[in-house]
Amino acid sequence: SAMDHQPKFFENLSGSGKAIGVLTSGGDAQGMNAAVRAVVRMGIYVKAKVYFVYEGYQGMVDGGDNIVEVSWESVSSILQVGGTVIGSARCKSFRTHEGRLQAAYNLVQRGITNLCVIGGDGSLTGANLFREEWSGLLEELAQNGKIDAEAVKKYAYLNIVGMVGSIDNDFCGTDMTIGTDSALHRIIEVVDAIMTTAQSHQRTFVLEVMGRHCGYLALVSALACGADWVFIPEYPPEEGWEDTMCVKLSENRARKKRLNIIIVAEGAIDCHNKPITSEKVKDLVVQRLGFDTRVTILGHVQRGGTPSAFDRILASRMGVEAVLALLEATPATPACVVSLSGNQAVRLPLMECVQMTQEVQKAMDEGRFLEAVRLRGRSFENNLNTYKLLSHKKPDAELPKTNFNVAVLNVGAPAAGMNAAVRAAVRVGITEGHKMFAVIDGFEGFARGKIKEISWGDVGGWTGQGGSILGTKRTLPAKYLEKIAEQMRANNINALMVIGGFEAYLGLLELSAAREKYDEFCVPMVMVPATVSNNVPGSDFSIGADTALNTITDTCDRIKQSASGTKRRVFIIETMGGYCGYLANMGALAAGADAAYIFEEQFDIRELQANVEHLTEKMKTSIQRGLVLRNENCNENYTTDFIYQLYSEEGKGVFDCRKNVLGHMQQGGAPSPFDRNFGTKISAKAMQWISKKLKETYRKGKVFANTDDSVCLLGMRRRNLVFQPVAELKTETDFVHRIPKEQWWLKLRPLMKILAKYKTSYDVSDSGQLEHVAMLPKEAVPAAI
């Protein structure tokens, strides 16, 4: 539209004279507090008044001290707390007309005409009804003499913006609801723990996870731990599933697999809409197979604990976006929800989302299960298809035979999630009929002939393993070209899949340049980005970055706790990332830091001075601690030591300093649910691309591929997974500093500053257009995780 040319800055949006009420309602979810904090701080920042509404709608009806104005400090230290600090209650009275009349009166008394509701679909539907009745309620209050005619005019409209907080991820129109990622963290922690004891005793475990009407948690945790079987409400098993499942379990045992994991969503049903309970599944396994079987019901553990880094960033982005939406709302705009699509904040009409969410339930009730899966959206459908692809090996007789050999290798530094990617590649490759080969120790191992065929069973249990099982090296192929070509010839390798970081990208550039000299390299090659630094051009995310971010966030939480114990202390924390500031910047956003120094945004002594003064001011408030993150290469002269000494000197008498270099713990650890899932999906897609390219480039009995589009990087770009020729990515790359020239997350940099109370400029041109809930065409391309 013509409007797009003028960038829109939030400094020009003022909230003065406006009052915003924030409430959490329905079941609690981790990350709600991060959302509350962002709404409060952004609201105050734009000079609006912000009110807490305690205990959800109940507090709105009861009024009194349940609705209080809050300050900047009111939301300090809540970012890392699970649940909701302002409470949530199921409220019967708000469902009555009298209840809503009383609520309207309580809001008008305080001049609140903007509501930010954080909750599930029930809470949001209630808010919308309230908005539709608002002017009628005010007129009724005026007739009863409760308010004057002036107030009816002044407060004529109620604006509503919703954020979905629900661990079930059961809301249509949003890829991830606040709390879902954290719930997955809890489930995965439990599954990882159970796996070790199940290994010891050769047991079968039936795990029941939450999700009365939605199978998302069950499905994604099954993907993330490679479960043997999963039961979800949207996709009931076919008739006779009892036999199929038992055959599958006993086959696995015969293959020397010492444990079986079966995941059941609490709302699981069969195709006649009859419940399938975890007890029923257990009894079946015991009666038919006599396996030692245990049931573990996870229950409310899934709602508890600290929010993951993903949920904190998601909720902080959504909170800021919600305030923008309220500032821009007019009487004509419908109530909206702010949500994420892929990697982009979007606004959607609230009722469209609610209607679509209800359509899913209706489809399930009426036995239209394929429709239900489709209505859940492309991310859900993609998860289901990937799970089906990877969990069941077809008998050899049923597999196609392509006679192609495909090699997989890890290049660069270890990143959590690499093994999940290798597993997916191997299994998809075998399903497509190829022979899969694993290369040990990257290009260096390749040159030395460390290469062997790898089977379906060899990669069992790999999803949850950290590091790189195949082994990885930073060595580039250029000095081994002759030897690598020899190995490719000897093993008749027809395609290459490289999982790794910036070195993997450089390696593919070198191999494609060597095609003129060596025919062996004229084969399809694909790269899947895996590095904690997230510095690979052509992709918004790389495998391993989410796990590293969680490590940084957890550590910062602990450090903050130690600092608030000693009072008036500032911590300076150094993160990894090479020259890429992703970890420092996003870590700062997730941990609630005061500043983050990164290479991409040059800073000088004046800025350091301003940061010290800012912290000095902060120490005068009730928040007497500071947290500063520094990327390892942000500036060669302003080192961590230099900044530590400067702060110590300038802060004398006001605060003292400590420093902490996080180091290699950022590369280790069990992969987070996001990295397992992202690695699995992106790698499966890359393997399917290889199959397609092999068919296209097979001529006269051999594979010959020498065009640019046969050497690609598969990346996540905004809302889609895209294959991009590495040759075309050259212009987007700063090779000296090993980073992309344009990085999406720099746009989020002002968020951290706003939430830490710095004056800053923030370009919000991207937000604001109300989109519609897309009813997907049957063959839509899946994008989000």
Image: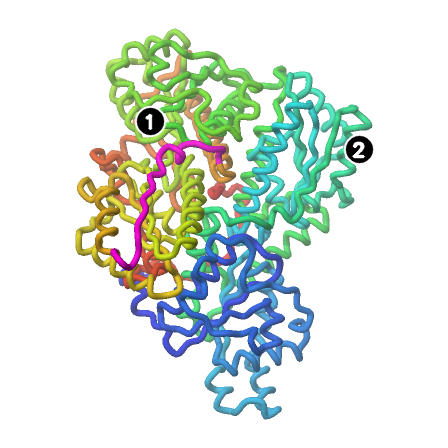
| Image coordinates for residue 577, horizontal then vertical, percent | 32, 38
Task: Look at 58% across and 73% down and name the residue there.
Answer: 60
Q: Pointer 1: residues within 10 angstroms few (<14), some, or many (20+)?
A: many
Q: Is residue 466 above or below residue 252?
A: below
Q: Nearer the viewer, residue 104 or 710?
A: 104
Q: Which residue is mark 2?
A: 283
Magenta-colored span: 652-671
Residue plotted at (56% across, 56% down)? 83
- The reply to whether the C-beta atoms of the residues labelled 1 and 2 are less than 8 Å apart is no
Q: Earlier in the sequence, mark 1 or mark 2?
A: 2
Please tell me whether mark 1 sits on a helix, a strand or a loop: helix
In three-dimensional space, the C-alpha distance between marks 1 and 2, rounded to whole angstroms, equals 49 Å
Quadrant of residue 751 within the rendered picture:
bottom left
Give me the disc on residue 444.
Answer: none
Give residue 38's quadrant in the image. Answer: bottom left
Which kind of residue does numbered mark 2 sit on? Asp
Residue toward you, 663 or 655: 655
Which one is nearer the viewer's eye here, 159 or 266?
266
Picture coordinates of residue 290, whole percent (x, y): 79, 24
- Asked if residue 758 lies in the magenta stretch, the reply is no
Tell me which residue sits at (40%, 19%) in the image.
495
Position of the N terminus, as image quadrant, is bottom left
Label 2: element kind: helix
On residue 504, the disc is: 1
Q: Judge left or right: residue 143 versus residue 730.
A: right
Q: Is residue 18 above or below residue 259?
A: below
Q: Amino acid at mark 1?
A: Ala
Q: Nearer the viewer, residue 496 or 161?
A: 161
Q: Is residue 219 visible?
A: yes
Observer able to see residue 324 = no
